Image (tube, rainbow, N blue to C red):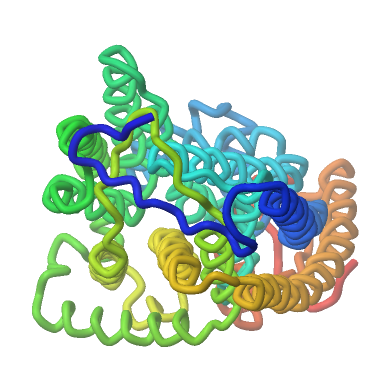
Amino acid sequence: MTAAPGVAIPREPVPAGGGPGRGSGRSRGLLRSWTGVLTAVLCLLPLGLLVAGAWLGRHVRPSADEWCFLPKVRDLGVWGMVEKFYVTDNGRIGNGLLVGLYAQFPVAGHQWFALISGVVMLGVLWALTVLVLRRSGRTAPRGMPLLVASMITAVFLFATPNTYKTFYWPAASVSHTLAPVLACAAALPLLLARGRRGRAIALAVVFASGVFMGTLSEEASVVCLVVLAGIVLLGRWILTERARAAARWWSLAGMAGIGIGTLVLMTSPGGRRRRERFGLESTSMLAPESLVASLRGYAHILETVLTTWQYAGALAAGVLLGLLARGRAADAPVLLPVRPLLWTGFGALAFLVSGYLCTVITYPVFGARVMTAQRTWNDYLLLYVLLLVGAGAFLGRAVRRRERRTGVATAVAAVVCAVAVGGLAVPLHDLGQDMRVRAQKWDRQDRFLRAQAAAGAKSAPYTPLSVAGTLEPFGGKGRKSWPAGCVADYYRLDRVTYSTRLP
């Protein structure tokens, strides 16, 4: 089978052991068997970590903003939540929809959120890995795409400084963790497209996804705009001529959708109220002092991210992919012959630019706290993890092309994957213990408050129960009352009062 005109499919080196013949066939069979066992064993590590993380989700209980979400959804339903976001809170109607979907099942919705969102993330990233390999004319050992996807998911969720707010706190996850993964899902129809009808469907999907993203997360929208603009401007150095036009139209459709969604958000009554609440109408995020302060904050964020060694697991997974993947004649090749430094440079530029822009738009709201509001980092950290996997794949490919025997490199990459998973497991276990203790106390107080309301009480004491820095009523030793009023609404009380002792 020949490649499309102008597309070079590099010739793979012959595996160690000689040319064609019985010995060569036996060697290849042993190699395939060995790599199959390796990928299967390695897959169990990140998958096991993800299963453990999802199991700990049973200890999640409402906190912070969710105290206000629950009574609203109980009284007015999911669409009441959407209306509240659009008219009163922030204009994020896409966010309000997702919040309403889990908040309509009060405590159970919080407990199941980690499992459901984790399965969605893993499924999207697995499908993305498979399709990228297929459309780039590569084939990998069975189980390798699942290993890569599970490592991406595990590192993305658990290498962050605050896993609770990244994975377990639904109010933050729908905006900053799930959002960038849903953006990746919009690329799947394009990678699956065959013919004019398939491309038309891909255009419709990315446009609708862009509108939704614009009303879901401003930060994730910024990341998408940077990536899509990069495809439009830099596609000539990455994509084959036959794929370039389709990719550009697809990117422009996504950018148009995001623009419309952002316009809906910015012109909404809730959006205007939010800007007034934070004084954003009179403050420009583009003011020189704000840009400089954002740069300082972003430098601090980068220092934290780049010194978090567990991210090496994503790089190692990419190295394994590069070592074990092989070229084949693609049905519809979309990528130009590999230029690792150029492609990695484009990816790094997209990550750095999008991360800084996200910091710029969040700084007026958070101020210096932008350096500790880790949940807002996740919108561009997924791009960072994908960049590490891609860079690792290029590195592994380079080693395989230069060395006839790659067993040592493969073993080292496998060990790094295993060590990274182990490094993620310890803090996850500690967080799980904190969540379990809070859940026990929360359930005890929940029973007490319900009993008080059933007995006709108008007021009841409340003890703040925080985990991983989440806000609770009467924070700061009783000085900060929010969201005490929402807690009272949830239990149908007139008010709750500060208490230091659990009932």
Q: Residue furthest top?
A: 197
Q: Residue at x 22, y 51 (%)?
A: 238
One can see residue 59 in this view: no
Up-down relation of residue 152 to residue 139 (above or below):
below
Q: Residue at x 50, y 50 (%)?
A: 326
Q: Residue furthest front?
A: 21
Q: Residue at x 14, y 83 (%)?
A: 289
Percent of width and height locating residue 472: 64, 67
Location of the N terminus by quadrant is: top left
- Say left or right for 426 vs 310: right
Percent of width and height locating residue 287: 10, 75
Q: Nearer the viewer, residue 397 or 490?
A: 397
Up-down relation of residue 14 to residue 250 (above or below):
below
Say which quarter of the image contains residue 408: bottom right
Percent of width and height locating residue 249: 17, 31
Location of the C terminus by quadrant is: bottom right
Q: Nearer the viewer, residue 8 or 458?
A: 8
- Say left or right for 269 vs 19: left
Up-down relation of residue 365 to residue 308 (above or below):
above
- Say left or right for 199 vs 153: left
Percent of width and height locating residue 55: 82, 53
Say which quarter of the image contains residue 87: top left
Say which quarter of the image contains residue 278: bottom left
One can see residue 27 in this view: yes
Q: Residue at x 52, y 44 (%)?
A: 139
How many numbered discs sit on the rendered protein?
0
